[in-house]
C-alpha cells in the first residue's frame, strides 16, 4: 500500500513537470512567433519606406531621390535636404560616371535628372560624365566644386539650370555630345544649339584672350564669372544683352569695349573686375543694372557715348567704389551739363568731351595671305570713319591663337598653317571689322632665284591662268594653290618662263596662289 502511494505521488509529480514543460514550450513558441512577426513588420516597413516617393538612398558614391514609382525613376541628389547638404565623408570625389539605371531594394530605377545643388561643395570632385538617360540638370549643381575640371554632357540633356557652374575655378571643359539638340560646345565653351547664347566660358581656362563668335546675341548670367586669366575680350556687334554677373570678378580684364548693339548691361555684369582700366558704354545702351561696375577700383577712363543721358535707366550703385575723383568720364560733345545733372553720372569730378566720334571701321581687304616667319601688318589696311575721329585706338583679337596671334599694333604672326579671323574693335564706340588671314608655310629662299620676278594673269578665271617668271631656268618652281581654309588643293610645276596653269578641276570660289615667293588671289568662276 505504501509503495502504491509513492508510485501515485511520483506519477502526480511527473505529470506536473510535463504540464510545466508543455506550458513553457507553448510560451516559447508563442514568443518566437511574435518575434518573427515583429521582424517581418520591420522588414515590410523598411521596404515600404525605401520605395516611397521623396525618399533618398545611396548606391555607390551617389545619392538618389525617388521621384516616380510607375515608371520607376530617380534623380541624383544631395545627401541632405537642406544646407549643409553633405557630411564631409559622404561627398562624391574623383571621377564620377553617373549610371543610366540604378538598382535598389530589388528594383531597377532610371536616372532621369540631376537635382538642384546635387554636387554643391564637392570640392574633391574632378570630372562628371552625364548619361543619355538624364534630360535635365538643375541649378547650382556644381557650385563650389573647386577641383572639377571636365563635364561631359550627353545628347539627352535639354535643360540646364541657372548658376550650375559657378565658383568652379579649375573647370576647363564642358563637352556636349554633338547629337544634343538643345546645347553645343566649342573648345569646351557651352552654348545653346544655335550659338546665339553663350552660357558658360569655364573659369579655369588659361587663355588670356577670347573673341565671342558673331552668332552670339546674349551673354548669359555668370557666363565669364571668375575667369581671372582673361585680359582681353572681343564682343561682336551681334550681342544685344549682357546679363547678370556675366563678367563678375574677372580680375584680369584690362579694357572692355561694349559694341553699339548692346541695349542692356544687367546687374553686377562687371562687378569686382578690379583690373579693369577702361570701359566703353555705347549710345545703344538703355539700361544699366544694379552694381554693374561696382568695385571696379582701377577704372581710370569711362567712355560714354550716350548722347541723351535721360534715355538710360540706372539701377542703384552702378559705379559704387569706383574712384570718381580720378576716373575720367568721357562724354559726347555738348553733353557735359546733362551728365552733371544726371544721377550717378554727376558724381564723377572729371568729365571731358570725346570730340568727333568714330562711326565705323572696315578693312581695305577682307582676306589676306601670309607666310610663317613673315609678319603681316594689318594696321595700314584699316579704315576708321570719319577720318577726323579723335580716338582711333583699336583692340586687336585673333579667334585662333594656335594659327596666328596679333599684337596691340595689328601685327599678325603666323604660328601654323590654316585660316584665322583677325578682329579689330574701336575703343571709341566698339565698332568691329574682321579680316580672314590665310597662313601658309614658311618661304624657303633656297627655291627662289635672286632676281626672280613673277606675274600672274588673269585673276578672275574659268579654266586657268598664265604665269610669267623673269629668270633663267636652272631649276623648276613649284606653284601651289590654297583654299580659304588654308588647305592646299592643287600644285603645278613651272619649268618655263611663260606657262598656262589649268584650274578647271577646282570648284567655284576664291583661292590663294603661291609661286616663286609671291602670293596671288584668284577667283574661279
Image (cartoon, rainbow, N blue to C red):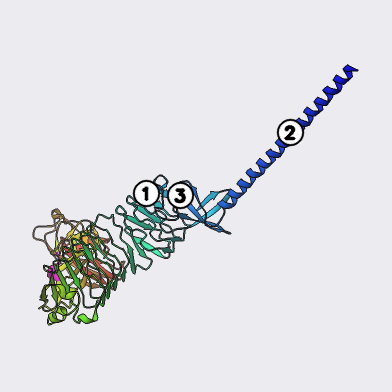
Does the magenta portion include 380?
A: yes
Q: Quadrant of residue 435?
A: bottom left
- Which residue shows up at 60% across the image and 49% down it? 45
237, 257: nearer the viewer: 257
Provide the secondary structure element on which disc 3 rests.
strand
* Tag shown at residue 62: 3
List the single residue furthest toward the front: 2
Which numbered disc, 2 or 3, marks the residue that appears first in the sequence? 2
Magenta segment includes 296? no
Q: Is residue 514 visible?
A: yes
Task: Identify the main secondary structure in magenta.
Answer: helix
Q: How many marks?
A: 3
Q: Nearer the viewer, mark 2 or mark 3?
A: 2
The residues bearing labels 1 and 3 have C-alpha atoms spaced at a distance of 12 Å
Q: Which residue carries the number 2 mark?
A: 25
Q: Is residue 163 left or right of residue 321?
A: right
Label 1 and label 2: CA atoms lie apart by 60 Å
Q: Secondary structure at mark 2?
A: helix
Estimate how packed mark 1 is, as few (under 14), some (14 to 19) or many (20 or more) residues with alpha carbons within 10 Å.
many
The mark lying in front, picked from 1 and 2, is 2
Query: The N terminus is located in which quarter?
Result: top right
Q: Dividing the picture into quarters, in which one does residue 144 lie?
A: bottom left
Q: Which stretch is magenta?
A: 377-381
* Nearer to me, 481 or 425: 425
- Mark 1 highlights which residue? 125
Q: Name the N-terminal-most of marks 1 and 3.
A: 3
> Considering only vertical position in the picture, is 336 above or below 480?
below
In the image, residue 159 lies at what x, y percent?
43, 64
Label 1: element kind: strand
Q: Does the CB distance between marks 1 and 3 fall below 8 Å?
A: no
Locate the C terminus by quadrant.
bottom left
Amino acid at each position: 500500500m505504501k509503495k502504491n502511494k509513492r508510485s501515485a505521488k511520483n506519477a502526480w509529480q511527473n505529470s506536473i513537470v510535463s504540464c510545466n514543460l508543455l506550458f513553457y514550450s507553448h510560451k516559447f513558441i508563442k514568443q518566437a512567433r511574435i518575434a518573427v512577426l515583429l521582424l517581418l513588420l520591420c522588414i515590410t516597413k523598411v521596404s515600404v519606406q525605401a520605395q516611397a516617393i521623396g525618399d533618398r538612398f545611396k548606391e555607390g558614391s551617389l545619392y538618389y531621390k525617388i521621384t516616380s514609382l510607375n515608371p520607376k525613376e530617380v534623380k541624383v541628389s544631395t545627401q541632405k535636404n537642406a544646407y549643409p547638404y553633405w557630411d564631409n565623408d559622404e561627398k562624391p570625389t574623383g571621377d564620377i560616371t553617373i549610371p543610366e539605371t540604378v538598382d535598389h531594394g530589388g528594383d531597377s530605377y532610371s536616372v532621369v535628372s540631376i537635382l538642384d545643388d546635387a554636387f554643391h561643395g564637392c570640392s574633391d570632385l574632378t570630372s562628371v560624365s552625364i548619361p543619355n538617360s538624364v534630360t535635365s540638370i538643375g541649378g547650382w549643381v556644381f557650385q563650389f566644386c573647386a577641383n572639377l575640371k571636365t563635364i561631359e554632357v550627353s545628347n539627352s540633356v535639354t535643360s540646364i539650370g541657372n548658376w550650375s557652374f559657378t565658383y568652379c575655378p579649375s573647370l576647363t571643359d564642358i563637352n556636349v555630345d554633338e547629337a544634343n539638340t538643345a546645347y553645343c560646345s566649342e573648345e569646351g565653351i557651352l552654348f545653346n544649339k544655335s550659338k546665339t547664347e553663350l552660357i558658360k566660358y569655364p573659369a579655369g581656362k588659361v587663355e588670356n584672350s577670347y573673341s565671342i563668335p558673331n552668332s552670339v546675341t546674349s551673354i548669359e548670367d555668370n557666363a565669364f564669372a571668375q575667369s581671372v586669366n582673361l585680359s582681353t575680350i572681343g564682343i561682336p556687334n551681334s550681342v544685344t544683352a549682357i546679363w547678370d554677373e556675366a563678367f563678375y570678378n574677372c580680375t584680369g580684364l584690362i579694357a572692355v569695349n561694349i559694341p553699339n548693339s548692346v541695349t542692356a548691361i544687367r546687374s553686377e555684369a562687371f562687378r569686382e573686375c578690379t583690373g579693369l582700366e577702361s570701359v566703353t558704354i555705347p549710345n545703344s545702351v538703355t539700361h544699366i543694372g544694379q552694381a554693374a561696375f561696382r568695385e571696379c577700383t582701377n577704372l581710370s577712363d569711362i567712355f560714354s557715348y550716350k548722347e541723351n543721358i535721360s534715355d538710360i535707366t540706372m539701377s542703384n550703385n552702378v559705379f559704387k567704389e569706383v574712384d570718381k575723383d580720378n576716373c575720367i568720364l568721357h562724354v559726347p560733345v555738348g553733353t557735359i551739363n546733362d551728365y552733371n545733372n544726371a544721377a550717378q553720372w554727376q558724381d564723377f569730378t572729371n568729365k571731358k568731351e570725346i570730340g568727333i566720334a568714330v562711326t565705323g571701321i572696315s578693312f581695305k581687304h577682307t582676306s589676306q595671305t601670309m607666310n610663317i616667319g613673315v609678319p603681316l601688318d594689318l594696321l595700314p589696311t584699316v579704315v576708321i570713319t570719319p577720318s577726323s575721329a579723335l580716338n582711333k585706338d583699336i583692340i586687336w583679337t585673333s579667334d585662333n591663337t594656335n594659327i596666328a596671334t596679333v599684337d596691340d599694333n595689328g601685327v599678325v604672326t603666323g604660328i601654323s598653317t590654316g585660316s584665322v579671323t583677325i578682329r579689330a574693335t574701336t575703343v571709341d564706340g566698339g565698332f568691329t571689322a574682321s579680316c580672314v588671314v590665310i597662313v601658309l608655310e614658311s618661304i624657303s629662299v633656297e627655291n627662289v632665284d635672286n632676281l626672280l620676278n613673277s606675274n600672274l594673269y588673269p585673276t578672275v578665271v574659268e579654266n586657268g591662268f598664265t604665269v610669267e617668271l623673269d629668270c633663267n631656268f636652272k631649276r623648276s618652281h613649284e606653284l601651289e594653290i590654297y583654299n580659304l581654309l588654308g588647305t592646299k588643293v592643287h600644285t603645278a610645276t613651272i619649268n618655263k618662263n611663260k606657262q598656262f596653269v589649268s584650274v578647271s578641276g577646282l570648284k567655284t570660289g576664291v583661292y590663294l596662289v603661291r609661286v616663286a615667293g609671291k602670293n596671288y588671289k584668284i577667283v574661279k568662276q
